[in-house]
Amino acid sequence: MYHSKITGLGFYVPENVVSNEHLSKLMDTTDEWIQERTGIKERRWIEEGSEDTSAIMGAKASKIAIERAGLTTDDIDFIVFATLSPDYYFPGCGVQIQEMLGMKTIGAIDIRNQCSGFVYALSTADQFIKTGMYKNILVIGSEYHSNGLDKTTRGRGVSVIFGDGAGACILSRTEDINKGILSSHLHSEGKYADKLIVSSPSIKHWVPEIIDSSGEDISYFPYMDGTFVFKNAIVRFSEVIMEGLLANNLSVSDIDLFIPHQANLRISQFVQHKFKLRDDQVYNNIMNYGNTTAASIIIALTETWEKGKIKDNDLIVLAAFGSGFTWGSVVIRW
Ligand code: UT7
């Protein structure tokens, strides 16, 4: 059996920086509230008129990752694209990447697991490599949130949190079974689907309603029971980190780098304190990008790598929790 390791990383965020002060002009909120409750100082939102979409940002991040892996698009065997904000209801963004990057007619799938999307995507790609089916897989997380948010006071509990951006990595076959992805652990609990949801458009609530919509139908905007999600997040994050460590006979003291999904800085800090991790063992960038959902872990991983914070043999733990509910972790020996 093979192992898979990350051989190339890249990310792309739109140029347009949106500060908390800017949001306070759109809705009844303050820089103080947003920073205190979420840790966010600014986020990137795609500007009106920009060509960027989830697929296009994903393609930009992918080009960087492929080049850094020392590969060409012809070397890629498969595409896994995680997003909750696809360009189209169908087909998915994966096939758009195949076209945009001029790739051979390789397979492409979309992963629809929201904040856990990248962890699910990485785990999915890992299985294809472990079985020997593929050698190099392009794994992408990308989100275009800003066009779908309620930017009025009515939506302030959600809209101040989310940002746009994309990250990508190449997962490649290695015969060194002590390196790369050691294990991944995935979970779901669908009874809480309605706690963090965009319920329209859907097959139940389709085109005629959209055309007739007066703009008052909030089912087209994300809904979140923030406090409930927060309480579940801190429990599930902790569980799934321990599950990953125990599966590999490792303990918290073995962690060199923990990259949590950037949901809320207070969630990351809760987990950090619970596991008594030092500041240099945890990487957060929610301050600069907000919550970019399926893109957050891969953007953070790329930034840490670009800053030279990852060394050979480091033990890296990725963990995520979000809508579904879904949650998961990936344990990597770099
Ligand atoms: O990434 C996927 C998973 N997502 C998460 O893990 C997010 C989890 N939840 C959270 O991050 C937090 O619950 C939020 C940041 C969403 C909200 O923070 P909170 O401390 O739970 O605040 P809250 O919802 O309990 O609201 C407290 C007050 C309310 O006012 P009242 O009822 O006390 O008068 C809200 O109306 O804050 C008000 N509020 C705001 N005020 C200013 C809500 N949003 C805002 C805002 N600006 N943007």
Image (cartoon, helix red, strand yellow):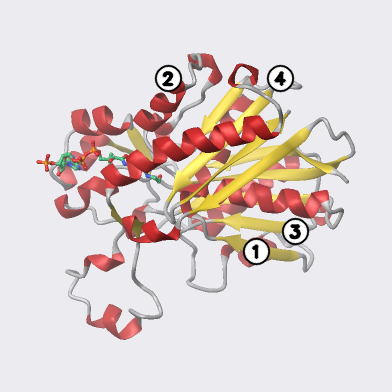
- Residue placed most toward the observer, 130 or 295: 130
Residue indicated by mark 1: 109
Chain-order first, disc 4 or disc 3: 3
Chain-order first, disc 4 or disc 1: 1
Residue indicated by mark 2: 273
State whether residue 236 is above or below residue 142.
above
Residue indicated by mark 4: 311
The C terminus: image quadrant: top right
Marks 2 and 1, Cα distance to the nearest angstrom?
A: 37 Å
Looking at the image, which residue is at 80% across and 50% down?
129
The residue furthest bottom is 208
State whether residue 261 is above or below residue 128.
above
- Under mark 1, the amino acid is Ile
Q: How many marks?
A: 4
Q: Residues within 10 Å of mark 3 (few under 14, many from 20)?
A: many
Quarter of the displayed picture in which ligand 1 can be seen:
top left
Q: Residues within 10 Å of mark 2 (few under 14, many from 20)?
A: few
- Under mark 3, the amino acid is Phe
Viewer-nearest of discs 3 and 2: 2
Within the image, what quadrant is residue 258 found in?
top right
Which mark, by number, is residue 78? Answer: 3
- Under mark 4, the amino acid is Lys
Chain-order first, disc 4 or disc 2: 2
Q: Residues within 10 Å of mark 1 (few under 14, many from 20)?
A: some
Q: Is residue 99 left or right of residue 149?
A: right
Secondary structure found at label 1: strand
